Image (cartoon, rainbow, N blue to C red):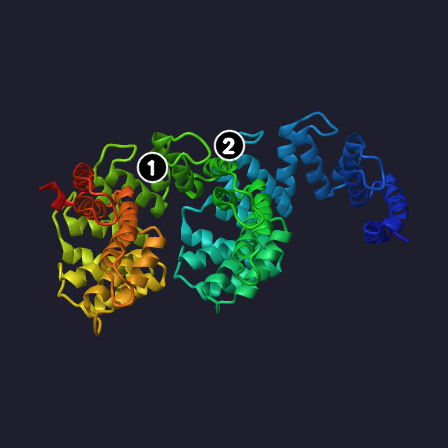
Amino acid sequence: MTLDQCVSEAAGLVGADAELQRAIAMLRHACNRSHGEGCRLLGELFIVGRGVRQEPERAAIFLGTACDAGDQRGCFDLARLLATGQGVREDMTRAARLMSDACTTGLAGACIELARRLREGDGLRADAERAQGLLASACDGGAGEACLSLASMVSSDAVRATQLYARACEAGVAAGCTEQAAALRDGRGGDRDVARAAEMLSRACDGGDLAACNHLGIMYEDGEGVAQDLDRAFALFRQACAGQVPLGCSNVARFVETGVVGTPNPAAAAELYRRACDAGAAVACTNLGLMLEEGATGVERNPTEARTLHQRAGEGAAQLGGDQLALVLDEAIGGPRDPHRAIELLRQACGGGIAASCTALGGHLEMGRGVRQDLAEAGRLYADACRRGDLAACVNLGSLQEEGRGQEANPTAASRLYEHACTGGELIGCTRLGLLLQNGTGVTADPARAVALFTQACQGNELRGCNSLGFMYERGLGVAAADLAQARAFYTRACDGGVLRGCSNLGGLVMRGDPANPPNPAAAADLFRRACEGRTGVGCANLAALYDSGSGVPRDPERARELRQQACQAGYQRSCQ
């Protein structure tokens, strides 16, 4: 048997534990006769301590012999030991020369490692131009990893970067396929093609890039580029999670928490969120914090830990966690109130491109919470967030336009914003548009369409829509005929859900009675009181009227006067006269 045959056979035996000692003996035999590959393979075993004691010093000797015999992989392995001082005296100059020589002979790994050190200035003077040259040469030689590394260096040139990702993918580098898919999905460096993006993610996932499995799962969840398939999405998220992709575990938790593809299991979801949060997924910290704020089945309420989790999310990815942390700080959840820090976080997240944070910041400026009131700036923030797709911002901007706050009143423009929000699924937009149509403000009055919009909102659990729907049935507007039973039902739903104007309206019905229900001033007083305690002016005014007349409550003119003052302070102008 020749030395080449001996080494070839040994290389085939190294992977089998039962044959490892025989393979080592064969490699020793070849290395003792200065066979380069034999010495390199033996040296690599001494680096990791497989079948022999881990001895970097002896590894360096074997690798040096391999390099002297012309084995460029041995030279590269020796260079890595020299670069770190492992088993030999650190010598970055010699390491760089060995890497350069190995790169010149076509060893792509040497080109990539040397380029990385030149790019980062790691042990060498930074030289981005030379680094790019080394990577380009290796990429042209068919090394996909070099194409991928070069793409990250030229990312500001979207067209070239995308071309390099494609070359890496074609060379079998799964991460290149993932990056190419992201470019296709976002339209970077060419036309947007979500179907092709899904194909590339599938290829990357099958190739072992489990982050791609998670991205593909999101596309199946949203039905983007593929037919929506929640079961397939869940399977992909689970595959990513099993491969230690934190965001994959966070997405599995979302499905488990809400029972998207099975029975909801908040306790199991909480554990998955915690695992993903600990692994660095900021969104998982936020989601777990939200669960702990309120508690859930099998998950004990813990506002203090929730606050800590939101802080972790904000620190780990301010654009993701800043908005929720700001809310926690503003509402003193799990700790003291800190409105100034809340504003700071919202500004950071808004500046980082999170439209919802711009909307929240606009809300603070509109109401003067933790900051000086500035309606004009609030309007600008709402407009920017609305343009970027935050439908709640569109409604808030419409409210300013409708009422002429911080800008000239323009209810017609407001109606268009409400329409846009309603069409997109922001149901408060449906309610606000319905009110304009009910009253003919800025638009042609259309009570029937107003009823349709209120119904849409109420069915989607937008309870202000239920209250407005109750008003239409009470007055017989936009419906075939007045229906007090329907009105009572809608007011009750609104009131029970916390819409205090609904409590006041329900109190009016209860006070007057109807064919099925006799008047009940005492119950009406309780409803008016509930509305008034929530600073609903009309509720205070109605309760004042009862104290004036002594209906359902003891007559008390002084208490009635106090309640009218409260009504006025709450904005009910009729009580201000």
Q: Residue furthest left?
A: 577
How many other residues sit within 10 Å of disc 1, few (<14), some (14-19) or many (≥20)? many
Q: Secondary structure at mark 1?
A: helix
For label 1, the residue is: 347
For the point 24% across and 61% down, which residue is it? 513
Left or right: 470, with 35 as reference point: left
| Quarter that holds the C terminus | top left
Q: Secondary structure at mark 2?
A: loop
For label 2, the residue is: 126
Q: Earlier in the sequence, mark 1 or mark 2?
A: 2
Q: Amino acid at mark 1?
A: Arg
Is 365 or 135 nearer to us in this picture? 365
Viewer can see residue 306? yes
Q: Position of residue 216 (x, y in %)?
A: 52, 60
Left or right: 288, with 318 as reference point: right
* Relative to 300, residue 416 above or below: below
Q: Position of residue 576 (x, y in %)?
A: 12, 41
